[in-house]
Amino acid sequence: MINKVLIVEDSKTTRLILRRMLEKEAYAIYEAANGIEAINIFPKDKPDVVILDLNMPGMDGIQTINEIKKIDASIPVIVVTSQGDMSTAVETMKLGAYDFLVKPVEAGKLIVTVKRAIEKLYLQKEISSLHESVDKSLEWTLGSSNAMKKVIEQIKQVAQSDFSIIIQGETGTGKTFVANIIHNLSKRSNKPFIKIDLSAIPETLVESELFGYEKGAFTGAIVNKSGFLKIADGGTILIDELENLSPMVQSKLLSVVENMTIYPLGSKKPITVDVRIIAATNKDIKSNVIEKKFRDDLFYRLGEFIISLPPLRSRVEDIPFFAKKFIIDACSELNKGILDIDEDTIEILKRHTWPGNLRELKNVLRRAVLFSNEGRIKSEHLKFLIEDKEYISYNDLYPIMPLKDAISSLEKKLIMKALEIYNWNKTKVSAALQIDHKTLNTKIKEYQINNHGNNSQ
Ligand SMILES: Nc1ncnc2c1ncn2[C@@H]1O[C@H](COP(=O)(O)OP(=O)(O)OP(=O)(O)O)[C@@H](O)[C@H]1O
């Protein structure tokens, strides 16, 4: 591809000299005799680099560079200046000029500067298209609601570093899924990703599973065994259900995080490991710290970066996307042709509160795919799945009580649900509940409903 260079210079002779110098390098050269001409040519010919004289009649170099940056800030501008104009040249650098050359311009210097400017331009384009494609593929994987866009931004910020991370979120919101993505985006991606689920391991075994043991460390330890922290060496370990760590293991883990060494049970010889730790929890671990159930020093070490995954009911916009995705997955798993889903069925999915979040949605749709034989998923295929649950929870929630109390309790729950679903957008909540703003505010006060970190309107 031939690169284009635009020379902006009022002196015809200087334009010609610059042209001659650059022609040897097989660039396509465009010329403008002043700033206004340059601004007209710029969008049409789309140069890759601009060489700009500072001293021109009419629109001077400073004004021209300002205008060029308004059209396309990424295009490098090389300023050509006379010895006496150095301070203005420095000013243009502040405005985003790539470099400046002092007259008389030396051919070798000009060619190298133009070459470097073009290389930088391509590098920038490559980086930004890489960023765009990472953004897009993360949105295709995680959803594109505003809440998830924030999470995606955090994932991009932290993935490449070695920061320890705590991922918090209700059950089934995708904490393991996100931890896996962070590992895959990190420089550790070709090393192991190991998950240890603390709720699935008896407390007495957690220590040996994490740190390993030496032969003879306890009855039954007949061979040396590596712990998960050693197996994950070079990679990432996900410690799931962090809140279940016993105080003793918490203190051992703290020394791992601080010194990156582990002592297998029964051994006095430290083993050095290089592991990134991601911890996941569906509890508010900070309140465990306040209640002294979790060491604050370990919390601060592990939570160098905290990602909070929103529950599915607070990102209803993502439900159609995930519904379609899970249906396609289930169809291929169950060997069925791809099924479509009715709009009113999607509406039912949007209205459900999904206490089990993505895991529940995935399971409900998997069952719906199994039951459907008509090429589409209709409301009847999942209505009973969801309504059964709501019926059960309704019975559990409402034992016999004074009617007035039952009505108040139901009213409070409905308002809370609507506030959560609409992210505390009171205009939308009033519309959904068909009450006015003032009544809504009175009821929020009356029922002492708190806005947990959301923005109310
Ligand atoms: N973005 C996603 N795309 C597809 N499937 C997903 C996504 N996020 C989560 N899932 C699926 O939802 C289910 C629950 O996800 P995951 O296990 O990551 O949640 P979790 O928050 O770690 O759950 P728990 O709190 O129970 O440990 C899994 O089957 C997972 O594959």
Image: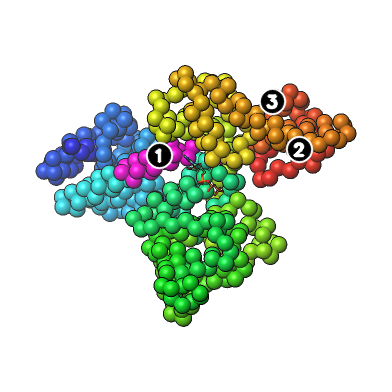
Instruction: Give the mark nearer the N terminus: 3 vs 2.
Output: 2
Q: Say if the magenta span includes residue 144.
A: yes
Disc assigned to residue 157: none
Q: Say if the magenta span includes residue 381.
A: no
Residue at x 51%, y 74% (from the top left corner): 219
**Mark 3 neighbour density, 10 Å: few (under 14) some (14–19) many (20 or more):** few
Q: Nearer the viewer, residue 288 or 198?
A: 198
Instruction: Give the mark nearer the N terminus: 1 vs 3.
Output: 1
Which residue is label 2 attached to?
Answer: 397
Q: Is residue 163 visible?
A: no
Q: Which residues are magenta?
A: 125-147
Q: Is residue 399 left or right of residue 40?
A: right
Verify CB contact (< 8 Å) between mark 2 and mark 1.
Answer: no
Residue at x 58%, y 24% (from the top left corner): 347
Outermost residue toward the left in this view: 24
Residue type for callout 2: Leu
Q: Residue 78: give x, y in percent of width and height.
A: 28, 46
Q: Is residue 231 left or right of residue 266?
A: left
Which residue is label 3 attached to?
Answer: 432
Q: CA distance from mark 1 to mark 3?
A: 33 Å
Instruction: Give the mark nearer the N terminus: 2 vs 1.
Output: 1
Q: Residue 385: give x, y in percent of width and height.
A: 60, 30
Residue type for callout 3: Ala
Q: CA distance from mark 3 to mark 2?
A: 23 Å
Residue type for callout 1: Ser
Q: Is residue 51 visible?
A: yes
Q: Residue 180: give x, y in percent of width and height.
A: 44, 50
Which residue is label 1 attached to?
Answer: 137
Q: Nearer the viewer, residue 433 or 109?
A: 433
